[in-house]
Image (cartoon, rainbow, N blue to C red):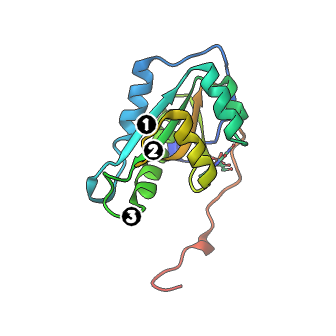
């Protein structure tokens, strides 16, 4: 049931009710689920920066060319990885990407809407987020997750299951 109702119906939401905010408890519920993601050797190298301030949201929109819909959303959650906590080089990217997906599914499961907006691997964008949010040098931003109350949920896609993408035993 979870598969049908949850995983297959998640969509990237880009239209939000600007008057509806999230409580701290809502945000912590979402981030708890993000923190249950798998990670290399269970290092859990993720860190999260939650932005609700309108001025900072505007600054994010200036440095991220594909996230203007953040303006009406309740919050931006910047999912970061601490290279000092990771298992091995670049593990922060895979570990925090697992956390992003958990976060998106949590958002969907709670009837909210969310969208993953890339920061990594764009080096210039990463630097700008590091500067704007005051991240230490060892803390790298992976993704901007825009979250809020949806006013429009995109139509469900055609079946994405493509059996030809599955290779048994060998390519
Ligand atoms: C790594 C990554 C980066 C993405 N970056 C953006 C982005 O910058 N802006 C945006 O609107 N959507 C972004 N998306 C969302 C994709 O466009 C979306 O997942 C894709 O079109 C499939 O639609 P769905 O999420 O509704 O299934 C990103 C998704 C991923 C996984």
Q: CA distance from mark 3 to mark 2?
A: 15 Å
Point out residue 58 in the picture as x, y percentages from the top left corner. Answer: 67, 27
Q: Residues within 10 Å of mark 1 (few under 14, many from 20)?
A: some
Q: Position of residue 83 (x, y in %)?
A: 37, 53
Check contact, mark 2 vs mark 1: CB within 8 A: yes
> Disc 2 on helix, strand or loop?
strand
- Observer-side mark, 3 or 1, equals 3
**Residue pushed farthest bottom?**
170
Mark 2 or 1, nearer chain start? 1
Mark 3 or mark 2: name the one nearer the start of the chain.
2
Residue that label 2 marks? 80
- Residue 42 visible to an observer of this rendering: yes
The residue singled out by tag 3 in the image is 89
Where residue 128 sits in the image (x, y, percent)? 60, 42
For mark 1, give the secondary structure.
Answer: strand
Quadrant of the rendering where the C terminus is positioned:
bottom right
Please name the residue that numbered disc 1 is placed on.
Answer: 48
């Amino acid at each position: 049931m979870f598969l049908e109702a949850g995983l297959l119906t998640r969509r990237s939401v880009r239209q939000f009710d600007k008057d509806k905010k999230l409580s701290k408890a809502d945000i912590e519920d979402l981030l708890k689920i993000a923190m249950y993601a798998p990670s290399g050797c269970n290092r859990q190298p993720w860190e999260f920066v939650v932005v609700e301030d309108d001025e900072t949201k505007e600054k994010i929109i200036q440095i991220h060319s594909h996230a203007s819909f953040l303006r009406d959303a309740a919050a931006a959650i910047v999912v970061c990885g601490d290279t000092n906590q990771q298992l091995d080089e670049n593990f922060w990217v895979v570990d925090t990407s697992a956390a992003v997906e958990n976060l998106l599914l949590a958002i969907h499961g709670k009837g909210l809407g969310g969208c993953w907006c890339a920061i990594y691997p764009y080096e210039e964008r990463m630097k700008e987020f590091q500067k704007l949010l005051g991240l230490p040098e060892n803390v790298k931003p992976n993704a901007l997750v825009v979250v809020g109350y949806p006013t429009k949920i995109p139509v469900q896609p055609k079946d994405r299951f493509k059996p030809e993408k599955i290779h048994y035993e060998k390519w």
